[in-house]
Each structure stands twice: as C-alpha cells, then as structure tokens.
Amino acid sequence: MADRFVEVIVDAGEGVEPRYRYGSGCIVAGRTVLTAAHVVAGGVTVRVRTAKKVLRDASIDTRFIGQEHGPAPDLALIEISDPAMDFPALRLARLDRRSSVEAAVQCHAYGYPWFAERPSPAAVREIADAVGEVPMLSKLVSGLASVLVRDSPRPLRPEDGALAESSWSGMSGGPVITGGKLLGVVIEHALREGQSTITMAPISLLEHDPEYPLWGPGVHNPATWWGRLGVTGIADVAVLPQRSPDVAVAPDVELSPEAMERFRATFESAGLTPPARWTVVALSQIVVAQSAPRMRELVPALRRAVEAKAVLADLGIDQLGLAQLQVIYRREIGAWPEDGSADALLVQAAEVEERERRDRTTGVLGALARFVIGVAAARSMPPNNHPKLAAWLGSLGYQVADAQWRYQDQLGARAWLLVDLGKEPWPGTAAGRPGTPPWPARIAWTYITRQGTTTTKLSGEKRASPTKDGLADALRTIIAALPPVHLLLVDLAVPAGLLDAGIEHWPLFPADDPSESLHDRHRARLRWSQRLHDLHLRGRCVERTARSSWTTMPKPLTEAVLANEPRLHQWIRNDTEHAWLIGRNPAAAQSDPLRALLKAGYCFLIWFPEATYSGRRRVITRAVARIPAAARRIVIPDELPGCTDRRMVIWDDPRGREDEFALPSSMAAEHISTRAT
C-alpha cells in the first residue's frame, strides 16, 4: 500500500509566487494519481515523488481537475508518464450519510505534511499516517467530511512560517483509507477547527446527489472519472458503514440482575425507573434527558452489551471459564475488570468503549469489540466466517477486515514446553546427599502447540552433563530444536534441591547485554518434578486446590511455625482456605518447611529461600488484590512486582498452563531429535 502514496510537486511557472506547490496523492489504478484540485490547478508541470524518493514526471489534463471553491469537487486526476508503472485498482468506498449509525468510520489519512519533514542532511518528508475517524454527520451540509485524528501535530510557530499556514501543509491530496478502501482525499485544514480536525472530500462527490443539492453538481463526465479510478460507476463503490438498521437479538436475551444491580442507584438518581428486565427492547424505550450526560452514555452502552451477549452466546462463550474471560479482558482492554460474571465483563467493556467514543480514543476497534474478538479467537471463530458477528461489528460502524486482522493476530500459534529434570534423588546416592544440587543427566520434555482448534504434541529426551553448565547447554539445545511459534510458554519441573537454583533466570539467550533468560523470553514457571512421577502427590495437589479459595489472601506463616515441624504439620491439617502461600526459610529450622508444604499438596507458592527476607508480603498481596479472584491462578506470576529479595515462584497448576494447555498424563509422544550439531 505504501508504494501508492506519493508527493505531488507542481511548478506554477516563472513569475508566480510561490512558484512551487507541494501536496500528496495516491496511485489509484494503473498510473493514475488522485489528488486535490487546488494542488495541481494552474500548474505548468507536475512531478510525483514516491515513498522510495524516486522522482517521476506526470501530466495534467484540465478535464480531470475539479474546483477548489466549487461547485465541482476539489478533486483531480494526474497521470504518471512512466509506462512501466501499472498498479491494480484500489478498492473504493463512500459514506452512507443517511445511515442511523452512531459510530464513526475508523480511518487512516496518509500524506506528506510539513511536520513530517526531516531537515538533515537533506529535506526529506516522511509519510504521515494520521489515525482517526470520520463522524457520519460532520460537514453534512456541504457534502464534505471531517477526519478527527487521534494524535495531532503542534501548531506552527511564527518562525516556522506565515500565520495563515498550517502544520498540515502538504497533506492536501492525501488519501483517506478505511479497511483497505479509498474513502476520499484530504483538502483542507481550517485553523479555526484546531489541530486535530482536517477536511476530506469524499470521492462520492464526483456524482450529483439530487437529495443534497448543496453538495454540488459533481463533475461533468463522471463515467470517465470512475473508469480512470478502476470502476464502472458509483454502484461499484462500497457503502460504509455496512450495517442493517438493527441487529437481530432474541427478546429473551438480557443482562443478569446481579450484573446490573450496581446501576440501580444511577438510574434512580437520574429520575429513571430501572427496567424489570435488561433487554434490548426495554433499554431502547428509555428516554434520557439532555441534562443527564452520564445516562446518555450508559444506556447505549448497556444496549450494546445485550447485543454483544447474543453474539457471544453464538460464539460459545459458555465453553470458556470466567478466569479465561478475565484474562482476555485484561489483554484486550488493558486493565483488570472488577470481579463478577461474564455479563459484568460485557457491561464494563461497553462502558469503556463509550468513554473511548466520548474521548475520541476508540481506534480501529472499540473496547467491547476487542473483547468480543478476543473471545472469538479463543473459540476459533473467524469474524469473516461468522455472519452474526460480522453483522454486529457492522452495526457499530466497524470493518470486518479490521476485526479479522485482530483475530488473526490473537490466533497466532502458541506453544507450551514442559521440561522435566527428573525425580527426587534417592537418599544415600551422590545426588541425594544434603547440599548437593541434583543436576540431571537426562532431561525429558513435552512440547504442545495450539493453532486454532488444532493441537499437536511432541516429546523427547536430551542427555546432559550433570553440572550447571551441562543443564544450561541442554536447555539451549532443546529450545533451539523446537519449531518457531508466535508465543512459547515454558514450565520447568525440577527436584526440590534445584528449586532455588534460579534456572528460570539463567542468561540462556545471548541477545543484548545482559542476556535474556527463560523468564524474560518465555515467562518460565517452576514446578516440583516429583508430582509428574507420583500420582499420589499429584492427587493431593488436586484435592487441596479444589477445596481452597483464591479470594483468601495468604496469612504470614510465623517463624515459630516454620521452624517447628510438628507445629507446621498441625497448621497444614487445619488449613482449608489457602490456594496459595507466601513463605520463607526460617533462620533455624528442624526440617525443610518448603518440602513439607509441597508434600502436603500446596501447588502455588511464592517462597523466599533466605532467612534475611525483608518482608514484602504486603507489596505482593496489594498487587494481587487488583486481580479478579478467578484469574489469580492463571496470572499471579506475571503480575508480581519487582523484588530485591531472591524468590522462587512455584506454580504447579494441576490443570496445566493458563487453562489453554492441559497437563499431559504421560511424557510419551512423537519424538524429534534435539542432538546438538
């Protein structure tokens, strides 16, 4: 696409001030460049400069030059002289100004404005990509349209140019693109409108519209113009936004009373009676006064949430757990939701999207749409192959192509590598002597990939020198032999004697200085390897996890309890609520308290192996308190704050990893070679 965007340089001839004019343009089909009429009108010669900064001659034909101040549109076509250039026709789009759509059309305006100029070593202008939106009704009377850009340049300083000039100078003629389709051309930046609003001439102005006579007569030969643009006529131009007036939602689809209880007081304070059932029909019948701006945002947001609920039911949202939904919400919206049901997540996402609309920060897809696409990716339901989802996106003014792009990005292949460093060594053997690290001589691993609904499992073994360096070399070899994927997660199942070896933080990948570790690159987590080999120990883990609660924050285990084995066992027997613990090695212990907790079935521990631990339990619990309880099992290790104390994060989830990869029942599968070359 970038190869289509050109600078347009016009020579108005000797004696004309200024002699040279600079604008932007877009190669729409073959060698034809669409630009603004006022850029090329009156020019003697014209050249274009491509994104690769190659100058090419072009020709002006006055039959294809509109008018800057009407009545014909401010559009023009010029022809590049080089016959070797032959671009396929760019798809075209037009605005449906009669639409009842509330949402704006998301777009990108491309060009070579003044503020994108780099003065050194030679003056070169970069392509500016102004991301924004086109409100449906702005400048409706004249037939033009506003482009509200998300990030605007600073105004010109007096020393930069004349006061009548704009930082956007040079952007005129630049294309406005939405979903890969050309919507119009930038023609003006009116200083009175501020830095974030530029004006576009829609390409539909080439045709006269009898319903809107003030839009102008169009051009005198529209069929010829359309032909040079690569279409037979305006009927070939896509209409945006693509939507039906209403999305079909069954009358019994409603938001749950539990999710809506928190809005009851808001409705009543605005003098409104909350509906008995939170359905689309009931919400559509609510009339909100102009004096209640909060309600004017809330009611449409709730209506969109109900519509989204119908779409999500069709996507099979009931197949995903609440924890997965909360993680999707966090990833797509950038903040944790409040605790609650799936309906509560929908409402919160809809509220965020409404704020984005108000603040003009929606981007290509709003918060609610991003959340729904995230669920679609988790269920492997592509938007372009799901009519109900596509229709719902269109009803909000979004492009299915943008949703499909985001879906594909989320659907990239993901993998989990489970590395097993072996069982606990037998007492009395060399590896089993106290204080001797049980470095493995054999490493088993299982590699599970997931692409959409397809899951593939590989496994293998790697011999290693039973030393620290031997283990590091073996881990590098194993990972280097794996097929590349979009995202690789790693779990290290290690004997208790290696839990505090810091393997997950070893610098295994020489990239920058310092080198990256498994934790840095693959979010590595620790497991106790004995549970992979002893079903009885794994059963204890499952049982304790099932009867404990993630809403309970860990209480500190005192020095007296940790240092005394009988008292610790008594505490373990009485504990029925802790799903996870924060602990440390006591200064003087009769036994190993960490091993006792592991054997008792505690799977999730943040453990400080040194008795000099500074006591950051409250820092950790404050960070975890921001995470919804249902999602804590999945994400706590990734949300922990930085720490100067050495710590081990043992996260031995009996379900597997992140509710996406199930813990294998055995390590046997197809083998691939991991021999070093």
Image (spheres, grey):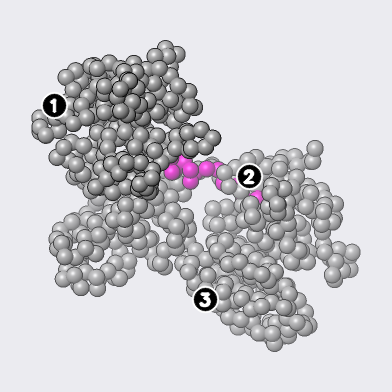
Label 1 to label 2, Cα distance in Å?
65 Å
**Amino acid type shown at disc 1:** Pro
**Amino acid type shown at disc 3:** Thr
In this view, the residue in front, 139 or 1, is 139
Please give the range of residues in magenta. 402-417
Task: Read off the residue under disc 1.
Answer: 217
Task: Read off the residue under disc 3.
Answer: 552
**Nearer the N terminus, badge 1 or badge 2?**
1
Please identify, in this view, whether the residue under mark 1 or under mark 3 is nearer the observer.
1
Q: Is residue 74 above or below residue 459?
A: above
Say the numbered circle drawn on residue 457.
2
The residue furthest top is 83
Task: Confirm whether the magenta stretch covers residue 529.
Answer: no
Give me the residue at 70% from left, 58% from top: 504
Quadrant containing the C terminus is top right
- Location of residue 175 in the rendering, given as x and y in whole percent from the top left corner: 34, 32
Give me the residue at 52% from left, 37% from top: 120
